[in-house]
Image (tube, helix red, strand yellow):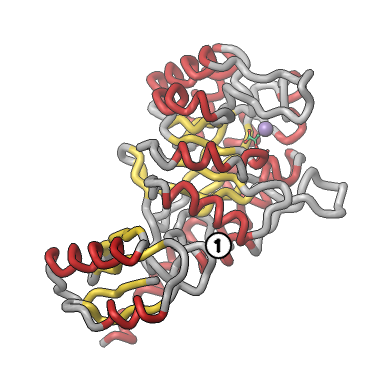
Amino acid sequence: MIIAMRAGATDEQINHICARIRDFGYVPHVIRGAERTVVAAVGHGDKKEHIESLKSADGVEDAFPIMQPFKLVSREVKKQKTTIKIGDLSIGDGGFVVMAGPCSVETRQQLFDTADSVAAAGATFLRGGAYKPRTSPYDFQGLEEDGLRLLAEARERTGLKVITEIVNTEDVDLVAQYADILQVGARNMQNFALLKKLGAVDKPVMLKRGLSATIKEFLLSAEYIVTNGNPSVMLCERGIRTFETATRNTLDLAAVPLLNELSHLPVIVDPSHATGKRSLVKPLVKAAIAVGADGVMTEVHPKPEEAWSDGPQSLRFEEFALMMKELQPHLELRRLEAEAESQALAMARD
Ligand code: PEP
Ligand code: MN
């Protein structure tokens, strides 16, 4: 249930509500907004008598059940979009971040050349898998800690922040030492032991949508991380499996505005894994801007034909640089739209 406090409710009143919630057997989560505080009580039940009793407590404006099965990640609980800060970068503040890099970290030269190139073109995050969840056990599985070290060196060299995948529960602490964002791959979206462990980490997590996950399942997986203590979660739409075989997956673009309606978490689009085709990446990055994504992740490789994984969907350096240039008018249009929207809102208030 949600307990909406009155504007100006005191800390004492909020603490009292939290204690009552615990007595009733729920776990309280205090969410402080710009104007008022809400307390979300999560657990079984949302019993009517508990809601009625909390409604009459001091400092409470209203109390009502949360309708969605996912709670803390829902817009019902938190109207304001979540902004995740990573050093001087922000994700979810209305801007658009670009994460780019190879599918797998292969060699020092490959990673450093890619990092230099994508940084010069305007990316702010370097992606690259050191642990690879491959469909076949005979495919390259990643350089593991050596790959993490190379990513950290590339960060030193370029100033790019690093996003890399965590595959196993046992490696969480190690990967968290090196990464700025921990990526949970599509194949691990419902690895609940991993999600719970990531709840205890103080690094942001990017959760990729499972190959056949519904939006509800996707958000419930995000809920696992948040309810276990880590509020810095972003969602990544990376295509889902459909009857279509012309593309590797089917990019569910409608998921982006829908996730934005249902949840306050930032949304990232990955057109590389969604399509499996280099030529489709740029148009879909433009589409991601248009449908309100907070950023994209794209694969880039110095020589895609020689890549150890996902070459056909990886952009060449010059293709990535050209794409970054071509995005500018699309981003400008989005800025103008946001400006017009906030002016209209301000006028409606006056
Ligand atoms: C990746 O981003 O490297 C990856 C393996 O993607 P996904 O989990 O979406 O397949
Ligand atoms: Mn890949």
- Residue 304 percent coordinates (x, y): 72, 25
- Residue 61 percent coordinates (x, y): 25, 81
Which residue occupies the foreground of this view, 341 or 53? 53
Does 283 appear above or below 61?
A: above
Rendering quadrant holding ligand 2: top right
**Rendered-image quadrant of the C terminus:** bottom left
Q: Residue at x 35, y 76 (%)?
A: 50
Q: Residue at x 61, y 27 (%)?
A: 102
**Rendered-image quadrant of the N terminus:** bottom left
Q: Is residue 13 visible in this depiction of the protein? A: yes
The kind of secondary structure element at disc 1 is helix
- Residue 104 percent coordinates (x, y): 63, 24
Q: Is residue 190 shown left or right of residue 124?
A: right
Q: Is residue 344 visible in this depiction of the protein? A: no
Q: Quadrant of residue 259?
A: bottom right
The residue carrying mark 1 is 259
Which residue occupies the foreground of this view, 38 or 155? 38
Q: Residues within 10 Å of mark 1 (few under 14, many from 20)?
A: many
Q: Disc 1, ligand 1: is the CB inside 8 Å? A: no
Q: Quadrant of residue 42?
A: bottom left
Q: Is residue 51 shown left or right of residue 136?
A: left
- Residue 184 percent coordinates (x, y): 56, 38
Q: Is residue 85 shown left or right of residue 266?
A: left
Q: In the image, what residue type sits under mark 1?
A: Leu
